[in-house]
Image: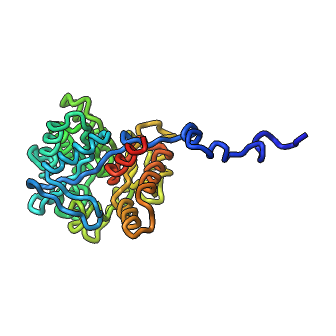
Amino acid sequence: MSTLTPRQFPNTRLRRMRRDDFSRRLMQEVTLTPSDLILPVFVLEGENQREAIASMPGVERLSIDLLIEQAKEAFALGIPALALFPVVGTEQKSELAEEAYNANGLVQRSVRALKEALPELGIITDVALDPYTSHGQDGILDEQGYVQNDRTVETLLKQALSHAEAGADVVAPSDMMDGRIGAIRQVLEQEFLHNVRIMAYSAKYASKYYGPFRDAVGSAANLGKADKRTYQMDPANSDEALHDMVMVKPGMPYLDVVHRVKNELKVPTFAYQVSGEYAMHRAAFDNGWLEAEPVILESLMCFKRAGADGILTYFALEAARLLQTQR
């Protein structure tokens, strides 16, 4: 009689279930669909305008009319939401970022146009001041160049409210100021905007993976050699990340934080496959070092396996097309 336990080889052969497509599909623990994806987009002024982003091949800044066409494609592919980021001209940048809450500003006009064209498409807006400040920081500076928390929050409240009044479904504060989530919720409630959701960047790290994004929105030149370590999180830490409905940014280097947030807080959890991650993958694809289609889907599956409910990714359109062909 065999002395092997039921889970020892050869009584257990794990490859049995891997042999055929039907059994692999039956035991698949995590699935990825277009409904898991959020497409980040960059909007600029003008009409019929598109600008390539050198550090993000395949991604473009688009004027509102062209953005609507891209949004229609995303919606048809089953992508439920866009995340909107503005490209603000130098003449609209200032020390106090007043353009951020202009009711007729680029973001506000974009939201209204998108909601008119596609009422059912979710629109997420970035609540942060760095596209609008002449110094490239996410807040209002004091005389020593330090970002003032409470003064910045006052401006963020105006910005968030202007986005919500324009029709944004979700406001996403990415600034990392203390206290801004509760303050924004209070203002939204006071203005009877009860159903506007807040996607808090509660775990945004002071990462070097954001470089191509800053090129895309035009804040890199203003920021210069300065950094954001006094308000974004230390890449060495994870305990301080756990708050609210959470966005983790960057994504793949911080999947341990995604996993902790989902398991410990049980809240809706999102992750951002940021511009640096996109740029690295795209360079590997373009040089033939990695095969694009399976690696795109594998990279996104990693987010789902870690616990992300949704993924912001510049690969959203490509991934959605691939997923539709696999049905």
The quadrant holding residue 191 is top left
Question: In the displayed structure, does residue 113 sit left or right of residue 228?
Answer: left
Query: Viewer-proximal residue, 18 or 35?
Result: 18
Residue 252 at what x, y percent from top left?
A: 45, 55
Residue at the extreme right of the image, as rendered: 1
The quadrant of the rendering that contains the C terminus is: top left
The quadrant holding residue 11 is top right
Is 283 placed above or below 2 here?
below
Residue 165 at what x, y percent from top left?
A: 16, 36
The quadrant of the rendering that contains the N terminus is: top right
Query: Viewer-proximal residue, 50 or 94?
Result: 50
Question: In the displayed structure, does residue 274 sit left or right of residue 52?
Answer: right
Residue 210 at what x, y percent from top left?
A: 33, 61
Q: Residue at x 21, y 56 (%)?
A: 140
Question: In the displayed structure, does residue 213 sit left or right of residue 30?
Answer: left
The quadrant holding residue 136 is bottom left
Query: Viewer-proximal residue, 276 or 204?
Result: 276
Q: Residue at x 30, y 39 (%)?
A: 80
Query: Viewer-proximal residue, 225 or 22?
Result: 22
Q: Residue at x 34, y 47 (%)?
A: 321
